């Protein structure tokens, strides 16, 4: 009597091999992922370090440029101070020049403005104010002198201080009735050329001094005496 029997197959080694292959594949994937992650971290660190170095270099350039600009600003400020000092010195020189020429200009102007019949006896200056005293033949002559001084552009605040009648005796022992007076006025800085249309006799004192004849100061001295 014959019987059919199935052969026995051991599949355990096959399953073990498959498990080993799967395990190896997983390990390979994990290793690749770790390698890729490390590469990404390394490249990112290098990129960040490069950016930091570029920013540091840019900051150094900006610092150097700011220092250079600060130096130029200090030079400009020093130049401004020097220019201001020179302008102040120039103004001081011009003021001294004006102060030195003012007495001559005033005497020349008085020669032109004092009418006939008026004789000046004194001229005093206190700062920017002047006081003159003299003798006139009549009050009309005094009023004319006051108007003339008021028309001079560089003289201001001309006013009569005192006027009184006096009796004087001349060399011939003749008594004459005259008027002893005093008036004051102040100096006013002349306007710039072209700002005032009045020229010539009562114009800028500098121009008046330039156009006046040479003997004018001597005439003023004789009249004031």
Image (spheres, grey):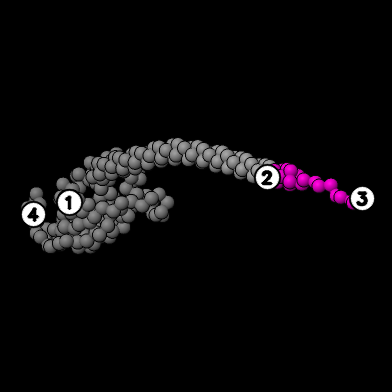
As drawn, the label of residue 2 is 3
Question: Between 60 and 170, which is closer to the camera in this rendering?
Answer: 60
CB-based contact (under 8 Å), mark 4 and mark 1 = no
- Mark found first going from the N terminus, 2 or 4: 2
- Cα separation between marks 4 and 3: 194 Å
* Image depth: mark 1 or mark 3 in front: 3
| Magenta extent | 1-22
* Image depth: mark 2 or mark 1 in front: 2
Report crowding for label 2: few under 14, some 14 to 19, many 20 or more residues within 10 A (C-alpha).
few
Residue matched to label 4: 169
- Mark found first going from the N terminus, 4 or 3: 3
Q: Secondary structure at mark 2?
A: helix
Give the image location of residue 42, x and y in percent: 58, 39
Residue matched to label 1: 126
Q: Secondary structure at mark 1?
A: strand
Image quarter of residue 21: top right
* Image depth: mark 2 or mark 4 in front: 2
Residue matched to label 2: 23
Report crowding for label 1: few under 14, some 14 to 19, many 20 or more residues within 10 A (C-alpha).
few
CB-based contact (under 8 Å), mark 4 and mark 3 = no
Task: Give the residue displayed 33% in from the left and 45% down from the top.
Answer: 206
Task: Give the residue displayed 39% in from the left and 54% down from the top.
Answer: 196
Tell whether position 12 is magenta: yes
Report crowding for label 3: few under 14, some 14 to 19, many 20 or more residues within 10 A (C-alpha).
few
- Cα separation between marks 4 and 1: 32 Å
The residue positioned farthest toward the front in the image shown:
1
């Amino acid at each position: 009597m014959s019987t059919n029997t199935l052969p026995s197959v051991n599949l355990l080694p096959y399953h073990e091999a498959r498990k080993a292959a799967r395990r190896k594949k997983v390990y390979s994937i994990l290793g690749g992922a770790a390698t890729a992650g490390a590469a990404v971290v390394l490249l990112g660190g290098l990129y960040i370090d490069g950016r930091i170095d570029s920013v540091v270099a840019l900051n150094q350039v900006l610092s150097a440029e700011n220092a250079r600009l600060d130096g130029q600003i200090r030079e400009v400020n020093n130049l401004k101070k020097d220019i201001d000092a020179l302008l102040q010195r120039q103004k001081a020189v011009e003021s001294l020049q004006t102060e030195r020429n003012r007495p001559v200009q005033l005497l020349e102007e008085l020669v032109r403005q004092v009418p006939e019949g008026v004789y000046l006896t004194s001229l005093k200056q206190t700062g920017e104010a002047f006081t003159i005293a003299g003798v006139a033949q009549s009050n009309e002559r005094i009023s004319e002198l006051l108007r003339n001084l008021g028309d001079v552009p560089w003289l201001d605040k001309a006013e009569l201080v005192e006027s009184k009648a006096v009796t004087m005796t001349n060399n011939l022992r003749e008594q004459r009735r005259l008027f002893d007076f005093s008036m004051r006025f102040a100096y006013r800085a002349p306007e710039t050329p072209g700002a005032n249309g009045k020229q010539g006799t009562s114009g800028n004192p500098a121009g008046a001094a330039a156009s006046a004849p040479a003997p004018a100061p001597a005439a003023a001295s004789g009249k004031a005496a």
